[in-house]
Image (tube, rainbow, N blue to C red):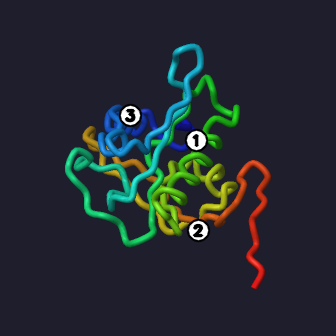
């Protein structure tokens, strides 16, 4: 998570908060993992529920977001597997599936400060700073971001279909 961005207390607090994946992502079949040699090395998913940031209400049913909006959630990569393109693969898959299955015209996420440059490279724009209250009394700064995904694109080649009138 980036020791230069967060204190040990903040990292411990957020780790305790996120150590269990949101059961809605699992139940919806919208949570994806990458395994290597039987170990989980990257993961992430999407939802159309209104739950946008990490919260203590993860186990409660959530209302739907405004139409055509999806939220990318629970994106993690094992530190030993960072900088190998795994998070990008998870993001591309989640974005494509949320667009194609969830009919998302807008995608939102909450980025850690250390993840902010990565998400900006993927085309996400900053909406506003936010913070997450932690059970250890700390506060975890983060940033809410969003983007409008390209329609009918082949992500691997970044080629979009154009309709001719």
Query: As drawn, which residue projects farthest toward the front?
Result: 165
Residue 118 in the image: state x and y as whole percent: 65, 49
Judge left or right: residue 139 versus residue 135: right
Q: Which residue is mark 1?
A: 90
- The answer for how far apart the CA atoms under marks 3 and 1 are is 20 Å
Question: Which quarter of the figure is the C terminus placed in?
Answer: bottom right
- The answer for how far apart the CA atoms under marks 1 and 2 are is 17 Å
Q: Which image quadrant is residue 8 in?
A: top left
Q: Are marks 1 and 2 in contact (CB under 8 Å)?
A: no
* Mark 3: secondary structure: helix
Mark 3 packing: few (<14 Cα in 10 Å), some, or many (20+)?
A: few
| Front label number (3 vs 1) | 1
- The answer for how far apart the CA atoms under marks 3 and 2 are is 30 Å
Q: Which residue is mark 3?
A: 15
* Mark 2: secondary structure: loop
Judge left or right: residue 46 versus residue 134: right
Mark 1 packing: few (<14 Cα in 10 Å), some, or many (20+)?
A: many
* Mark 1: secondary structure: helix
Q: Residue at x 35, y 66 (%)?
A: 65
Between residues 2 and 161, which one lies in front from this camera angle?
161
Q: Are marks 3 and 1 in contact (CB under 8 Å)?
A: no
Residue 102 in the image: state x and y as whole percent: 45, 59
Q: Is residue 102 above or below residue 19?
A: below
Q: Residue at x 75, y 64 (%)?
A: 160
Between residues 159 and 131, which one lies in front from this camera angle?
159
Between residues 123 and 127, which one lies in front from this camera angle?
123
Dot 1 or dot 2: first in sequence order is 1
Q: Which residue is mark 2?
A: 148
Q: Residue at x 33, y 58 (%)?
A: 49
């Amino acid at each position: 998570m980036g020791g230069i961005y967060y204190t040990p207390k903040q990292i411990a607090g957020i780790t305790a908060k996120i150590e269990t994946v949101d059961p809605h992502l699992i139940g919806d079949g919208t949570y994806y993992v990458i395994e290597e040699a039987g170990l989980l090395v990257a993961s992430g998913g999407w939802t159309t529920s209104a739950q946008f940031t990490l919260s203590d209400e993860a186990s409660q049913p959530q209302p739907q977001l405004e139409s055509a909006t999806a939220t990318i959630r629970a994106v993690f990569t094992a530190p030993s597997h960072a900088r190998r393109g795994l998070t990008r693969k998870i993001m591309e898959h989640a974005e494509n599936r949320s667009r194609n299955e969830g009919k998302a015209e807008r995608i939102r996420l909450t980025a850690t400060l250390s993840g902010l440059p990565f998400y900006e490279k993927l085309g996400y724009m900053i909406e506003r700073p936010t913070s997450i209250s932690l059970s250890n009394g700390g506060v975890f700064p983060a940033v809410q971001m969003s983007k409008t995904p390209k329609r009918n694109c082949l992500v691997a080649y970044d080629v979009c279909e154009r309709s001719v009138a």
